[in-house]
Amino acid sequence: MLLTSTEPLATAYDLAMLDLDGVVYIGHEAVDGAAGHIARARAAGMRVAFITNNASRSAAVVAEHLRDLGVTAQPADVVTSAQAASRLVVQRFGAGARVVCLGGPGLQSALDEAGLVAVDVEAEAVAVVSGYGPELLWRDIMHAAVRIRDGLPWVATNTDLTIPTTYGVAPGHGVLVQMVERFAGVTPEVAGKPARPLLDETVRRVGGRRPLMVGDRLDTDIEGARNAGVDSLLVLTGVTGLADLVAARPEERPTYVAVDLGGLTQAHAAPERTADGWRSGGWSGRVSDGRLVVEQAAAHGSAGDWWRVAAVAAWEHRDRTGAAPDISAARVPGTGGVAR
């Protein structure tokens, strides 16, 4: 269930680890208000790191993209799954180790930064490191798969099955991982969310004793935070809708929920149990005959409180019955329609 923070998250935690797509930007456009929310969190004393499972771009390229969107960012503020994967290789084999780079420029840059020697798929190497790379050749994938099957250690930057593109959602690096796994019978060591190395690498690079993971995906951002033992804030500007939230497994449930990054500079009150359900702010919620019902209980109720009430009422029902509630009648404030 959700927790309460009596002070704004930006002062209760000293580091915000922000996922990018769906949190700070969507494609090439900034999420409305994101730059201002980040600036206000920083003004309150919170460090900010931008973290991504996408291994195709270097930290410098990501930082430049953020600056183009009005977000203050330097390469040192950005941590990628390619950097986390490179750290895993250095820890196991040491700097200077020769590794097969099965990925794009972002992976190459991270390997170079870590002091590793990237080689082609036919060269002598101690490991294969793979990441998303749209220019990868099929012959190189085949050769790497054979070497992995024959015993060469394998580190994967992430297992994301999809990636957003200008022409729609497309297969991500996770599809390649699944294919090689099936062929080679080998499971890679994974650096990106929901595995914890990316979050550990972020804390190591940026610092912070009280980190908070901020994301829009339950199965990567929020589950990754739980795996790393840190609290999390789910924002609703990306892929998670009501259907996803009410069906969340315990390991996918965030510590806090907010409509957007404005939640960083707000205190958070967890819904309180009532005789027949849950209440927060101006909203009361319950599951009645298997249907989620959220009603206005006071003149002023924020959208954030609506989502929090809906979440805990649904999770209680799911934990008791094993099934998510019917949300067909639920309507999110401000949308004018049935919740997705």
Image: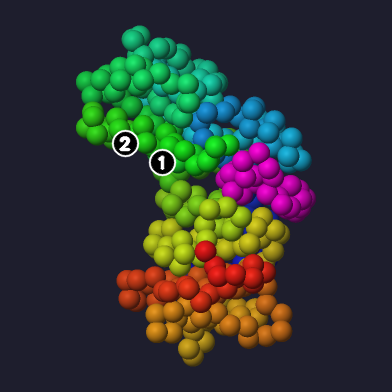
Which residue does the numbered mark 1 point to in the structure image? 161
Horizontal side, residue 130 vs residue 183: left or right:
right
Horizontal side, residue 45 vs residue 268: left or right:
right
- Report how far apart the C-alphas of labels 2 and 1 lie in the structure: 9 Å
Which residue is at a point 74% across and 52% down the rendered structure image?
33
Query: Looking at the image, which is closer to me, 144 or 204?
Result: 144
Q: Find out whether the residues at labels 2 and 1 contact each other: C-beta distance under 8 Å.
A: yes
Q: Position of residue 328 (x, y in %)?
A: 48, 73
80 falls in the magenta region: no
Amino acid under disc 2: Gln
Q: Residue furthest top?
A: 123
In the rendering, which numbered label is found on residue 237? none
How does the figure colour the protein chain or chains?
Answer: rainbow
Q: Judge whether residue 45 can be spotted in this image.
A: no
Which residue is at a point 67% across and 85% down the rendered structure image?
298
* Location of residue 157 by image quarter: top left
Horizontal side, residue 202 vs residue 64: left or right:
left
Q: Earlier in the sequence, mark 2 or mark 1?
A: 1
Q: Position of residue 262 (x, y in %)?
A: 70, 58
Q: Position of residue 3 (x, y in %)?
A: 54, 68
32 falls in the magenta region: yes
Which residue is at a point 63% across and 83% down the rendered structure image?
296
Q: Judge whether residue 155 can be spotted in this image.
A: yes
Q: Position of residue 336 (x, y in %)?
A: 64, 70
Amino acid under disc 1: Leu
Secondary structure category for the residue under label 2: helix
Which residue does the numbered mark 2 point to in the structure image? 178
Query: Looking at the image, which is closer to me, 89 or 26?
Result: 26
In the image, residue 200 above or below residue 180: below
Horizontal side, residue 189 vs residue 288: left or right:
left
Q: Magenta residues? A: 18-45
Secondary structure category for the residue under label 1: loop
